Image (tube, grey):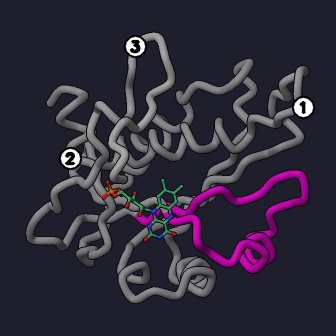
Amino acid sequence: MDFLQLTQLRHSVRHYATRPVEPEKIDYILECARLAPSAVNKQPWRFILVRSEEARAKVQRCYPREWFAEAPLYIIICAVETEAWVRPCDSKNHADIDAAIATEHICLAAADRGLGSCWVCNFDKSMLQELFQIPSGAHPVAIVPIGYPAETERPEPRRKPMEQLCCEDRFPVNTDETK
Ligand SMILES: Cc1cc2nc3c(=O)[nH]c(=O)nc-3n(C[C@H](O)[C@H](O)[C@H](O)COP(=O)(O)O)c2cc1C
């Protein structure tokens, strides 16, 4: 499988089988997250692996959706702002960007191992922060449910056409006046 095939394979899985995920696959996924790049190599992230019934129930309270509760495990990706690179010219803190890269490594690594995943950001942030005792100075960026997909088929990816997205030597502008 080449990288294009892997990116085509990864999609948001919202239906999971009960089959447990092998520990070595979890290790593989976490190692791929650990190796993600970050600004000035600050690695301003933490990962909370959620597997026990008790901890799963806590995560599910923060994003109460039937499909989400099916997942056998979750990884909560946290950004540690106090550890991240801050761009001098505008004081932009890069913790979120770094944590997002690690999150996508997790999703791609899961797909590579035959597992489904989904970015989830629409959770109750203060509840998650409290339930998992995430200290101030850090914040949860995403919850990624992981498990074997129980879907029958993969949906066609809906993406904007390349002409709208990429231009040589200039910012792409939409030339289609009807839109
Ligand atoms: C930053 C981010 C936040 C997202 N949050 C949610 C979410 O809270 N719930 C959800 O069901 N999907 C969420 N998604 C999944 C997107 O809806 C999905 O990636 C997008 O529709 C493209 O579909 P695909 O992942 O199947 O290619 C999120 C994706 C990203 C990148």
Q: Mark 2 points at which residue?
A: 9
Residue 176 in view here: yes
Alpha carbon distance from label 3 to label 2: 28 Å
Question: Rounded to the nearest whole Å, what is the CA distance between mark 3 and mark 1?
Answer: 30 Å
Q: Which of 39 and 106 is in front in this view?
A: 39
Residue type, mark 3 in image: Glu
Earlier sequence position, callout 3 versus callout 2:
2
Residue 160 is situated, as x and y percent measured from the top left of the image, at: 31, 45
| Near-viewer residue (92 or 47) | 92
Q: Which of marks 3 and 2 is in front?
A: 3
Q: Contact (CB < 8 A) between labels 1 and 2?
A: no
**Magenta segment boundaries in residue numbering:** 120-145
32 up-or-down from 73: above or below: above
Q: Which is in the foreground here, disc 3 or disc 1?
A: 3
Q: Which amino acid, mark 1?
A: Ser
Residue 54 image-quadrant placement: bottom right
Q: Is residue 25 left or right of residue 51?
A: left
Q: How crowded is mark 1: few (under 14 residues within 10 Å), some or many (20 or more)?
A: few
Percent position (x, y) of residue 93? 82, 36
From the viewer's perspective, is residue 149 above or below residue 58?
above
Q: What element carries label 1?
A: loop
Callout 2 crowding tier (Cα within 10 Å): few <14, some 14–19, many ≥20: some
Whether 97 is drawn above or below 140: the answer is above
Q: Mark 3 points at which residue?
A: 168
The percent position of residue 121, horizontal first and vertical second, equals: 58, 65
Q: Does the magenta-highlighted stretch encompass residue 130?
A: yes
Residue at position x 41%, y 51% in the image: 26
Q: Name the residue under label 1.
A: 91
> Mark 2 or mark 1, which is nearer the start of the sequence?
2
As helix, strand or loop, the secondary structure at mark 2 comes to: helix
**Left or right: 152 in relation to 174:** left
